[in-house]
Amino acid sequence: MKVFEIQGGFGFDYLSAAERPRPEPGHGEVLLRMKAASINFRDILMVRGHYNPRQPLPLIPLSDGVGEVVAVGEGVSRVEVGDRVATVFCQRWRSGVPDKAKLRSTLGGPLDGTLAEYMVLWEGGVVKVPEHLSDIEAATLPCAALTAWSALVTEGDIGAGDTVLVQGTGGVSLFALQFAQALGARVIVTSSSAAKLETAHKLGSWQEINYVDDPKWAKTVKEMTDGVGVDHVVEVGGAGTLQQSLSAVRIGGQISLIGVLAGSSIELNILPILMHRIRVQGILVGSREGFETMNRGIAQHEIRPVVDRVFPFEEAREAFVYMAGGRHMGKICISFD
Ligand SMILES: NC(=O)c1ccc[n+]([C@@H]2O[C@H](COP(=O)([O-])OP(=O)(O)OC[C@H]3O[C@@H](n4cnc5c(N)ncnc54)[C@H](OP(=O)(O)O)[C@@H]3O)[C@@H](O)[C@H]2O)c1
């Protein structure tokens, strides 16, 4: 079968097509014929060797994908041949609070990922996907969507009347925009691009801020919310944006710490956290149970992921380069058809 592997070193030049034997499902395992995959920022870091420089190679990258179950091993009862399923990011994290072993059971590093024509997974490492979604759309769910869901729902308790701020217009942030709206919250979106903010407005954002033109955007957020601040910040910037987020969130509000696009360390005034009783919650994607709950929500609200561009399997490397360029809005996918 055809795969893409990071082999011989790190960097996009080391991502190349290769042949591997088609795997066979053992006891409790399923064989998937992959239909589509999607890329997350983590995958860019993985290929570049920035996520885990000690990751053993070769590695098949990508955590996210959708496939058809084409064979099952003995003892499989959760899925059947013909089912359309998505991969679970942390293969062994079923529900609740994970331990270290569960957090290390991630696809696309350290485990081989979805950029392969076929893959064998434990039957508990897949979930059925909402029927109204295409294969491409469903392939965007395992990491970005579940991260946004975990932030706002599992850990965030967002509801009608709340105000949510999402940073940027990447995969996680646009899912957060869609989920928050579906739950009755209004959303402020920040972006470096006027054109992307215009599109975000068409997707339903309430207010928009250009964080390049307005680097002290917390003040603008306070003005927009009658001096109160937002209930929840979806923090993908990290160290470089956290101080603004601490000023933009209301007393007793939550910041979901998800990404480090603007750095991972900085000198920070932590006083607002205690004086304003702010909850700073780290998020790491989510469990299989969260994934299944999210899928019910996506189906009931008929939410459709925002897909920026689809690349054919043969052009997988170009897809990585395109994502690293940062011009996208929403998800970048790879089709196996
Ligand atoms: N903790 C977790 O479980 C988890 C899960 C998924 C992702 N992440 C992390 O979350 C981050 C986003 O991931 P993604 O997959 O959504 O990436 P993505 O699709 O590549 O989105 C990146 C977007 O973030 C925006 N951005 C960059 N710098 C920013 C800044 N200083 N302030 C505000 N927005 C900024 C940009 O939006 P504009 O172009 O509109 O400016 C950019 O397009 C990454 O750091 C990723 O590693 C963490």
Image (cartoon, rainbow, N blue to C red):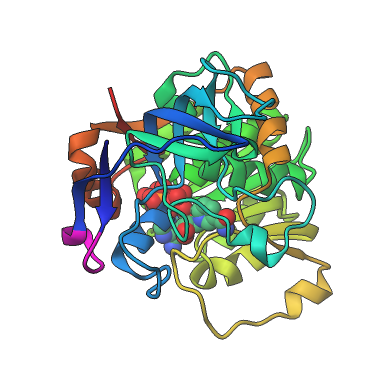
Residue sitting at x 59%, y 19%: 80
Residue 85 locus on image (x, y percent):
54, 27
Would residue 248 be visible to someone looking at this image? no
**Percent of width and height locating residue 19:** 22, 43
Quarter of the rendering containing residue 187: top right
Q: Give the answer, above or below, for where 254 lies relative to 156.
A: below
Q: Measured from the top left, where is residue 38 in percent x and y? A: 39, 39
232 or 154: nearer the viewer = 154
* Image position of 7 with respect to 33: above or below: below
Considering depth in this image, is 65 or 168 the residue closer to the camera?
65
Residue 37, compared with residue 134, is above or below; it is below
Residue occupying the point 34% across, 42% down: 115
Specify start and end residues of the magenta stretch as a single range.
7-14
Place of residue 276 in the rendered image (x, y in percent of width and height, measured from the top left): 81, 69
Residue 142 in the image: above or below residue 105: above
Quadrant for the C terminus in the image: top left
Looking at the image, residue 266 sits to the left or right of residue 56; the answer is right
Pick the residue in front: 15 or 285. Answer: 15
Rendered residue at 54%/38% (across/down) = 26
**Quadrant in the rendering for residue 47:** bottom left
Left or right: 24, with 141 as reference point: left
Q: Residue furthest bottom?
A: 267
**Is residue 263 a member of the stretch shown in magenta?**
no
The N terminus sits in image quarter: top left
Please tell me whether the stretch drawn in magenta is mainly helix, strand or loop.
loop
Q: Depth check: 256 or 62 in front?
A: 62
Residue drawn at 72 percent across, 49 percent down:
226
Quadrant of the rendered image holding ligand 1: bottom left
Examine the structure image and report whether residue 8 is included in the region drawn in magenta: yes
Q: Is residue 32 left or right of residue 13?
A: right
The answer to whether residue 140 is visible is yes
